Amino acid sequence: MALRQVRCYPAVMRLPVAFVSLALLLAGASRTWAHLPPGELREACARRRAALASSLPEGAAVLVRGAAWDERLPFRQTSDLHYLTGLDEPDVALVLTHERSTLFLPAADPVRGLWDGPRLAAGPATAEAFGLEEALPLDRLVEALAGLRRTGGTLYDSGPEPGPAGARPAGPLIAALRQVKDPLELARLRRAVEATRLGLVEAMRLAAPGVREDELAALLEYCFRRGGAQGTGFPSIVASGPNSCVLHHRASERPLEGGDLVILDVGAEVDRYTADVTRTIPASGRFGERQREVYELVLAAQAAGIAAVRPGATLAEVHRAALRVIEEAGQAGRFPHGTSHWLGLDVHDVGTEARLAPGMVLTVEPGVYLREEALGVRIEDDVLVTSTGSEVLSRAIPRAVEAIEALMAERGLGEFRPGKPLDASPAAPAPPRPWR
Ligand SMILES: [Mn+2]
């Protein structure tokens, strides 16, 4: 997915005053241990909290808000709270100081429990399960914040704006940590990329004139889930013919036509981490001469961008490297978006440091869009910065003209048969631990 030329922070849902004041004082519901995080996640979160605490001034505290429950929407925890606790329950908050991390959870609500299932309860068992010092009822949050205020230390608030009076934004502190992925995060990203590969390979086999954009999106998303993902990190972009020139076109009911190029810009999400990979394919299965010319130009620009990824380089340098190739072909005006964005818990992930360092993950995704020819091409891969340069995490997803045409020549639902195991990539990571 391409990024507008402004930096995005993830939308952080509001912590309504109402749910603090209305929290009921009822006994906590029990919860099975199957929903609790495995040790590796608990330990990773403890390390992340320690790193955040060590970045704080003396006496400071950070309020990290979870996402509110909205039964009309799929629940999605705020990325910051997930990053620091691994907890994917609604209406919670974390207060972190140098000394302790305290989780605040809503009181049990039997009516809500009937409809939505049990929730974690405040108490020592929950604190211990998540490796935190305390897990308190949410109605004590206001009192706890007032207590921190009296000690005179700075309060940082993860948002949204406006937070408690006088609080400073916590986003940049947490973003600086999230920008460099730890081993658990990289393992999740690799699994997300692998699930994305399974979907893209099947979509290339299925794509043909007459197949609708939304059929391809459905197949992609089915394969993601079959490959271990819980869904997508962003709405799937399947953009054929004239739609290929609409950067964030959502898959529509348009059937593919023989002369179309089709942009597939998609990402499976595994345990909250999303891939973001784009392939552009010919609906007919063979690139036309003009299509191939534009495709090879974008591919060359992407290669130049990827070659510029190394520790110490900047996103601007990566962009200039890709742009230069397109400029030299006289098409600079046809490349209207940035080349890169950070990738992780969010598809347009947070990052405060402009210089690349090992452990950072970015996309490299130049594009050329010729509206008068109904011809758009974008090619996007997910790139890990290593100590010596880079590793293209999505390198196993066919990208060369010949590789795409060979796959499309297989035609039909090759691997997509119920009960047939999906083909494994040479670099297939270990299967996920079943804790959800
Ligand atoms: Mn992208």
Image: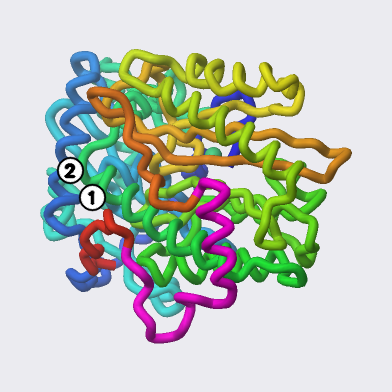
Magenta stretch in the rendered image: 399-424
Residue 68 position, x and y percent, is: 47, 52
Q: Does 32 appear above or below 314?
A: below
In this picture, residue 273 sits left or right of residue 27: right
On the image, numbered disc 1 is attached to which residue?
A: 136
- Distance from disc 2 to disc 1, alpha carbons, whole Å, reads 22 Å
Q: Main secondary structure of the magenta part?
A: loop
Give the label, 2 or 1, closer to the camera.
2
User: Residue at the spot x=28%, y=57% of the render?
Assistant: 426
For label 2, the SS is helix
In this picture, residue 434 sits left or right of residue 138: left
Q: Amino acid at mark 1?
A: Leu
Out of 274 and 129, give the one closest to the viewer: 274
Label 2 Cα neighbours within 10 Å, binned few <14 / some 14-19 / many ≥20: some
Q: Is residue 71 visible?
A: no
Out of 174 and 99, give the one closest to the viewer: 174
Q: Does 406 appear above or below 289?
A: below
On the image, numbered disc 2 is attached to which residue?
A: 44
The quarter of the picture where the C terminus appears is bottom left
In this picture, residue 107 sits left or right of residue 333: left
Q: Amino acid at mark 2?
A: Ala
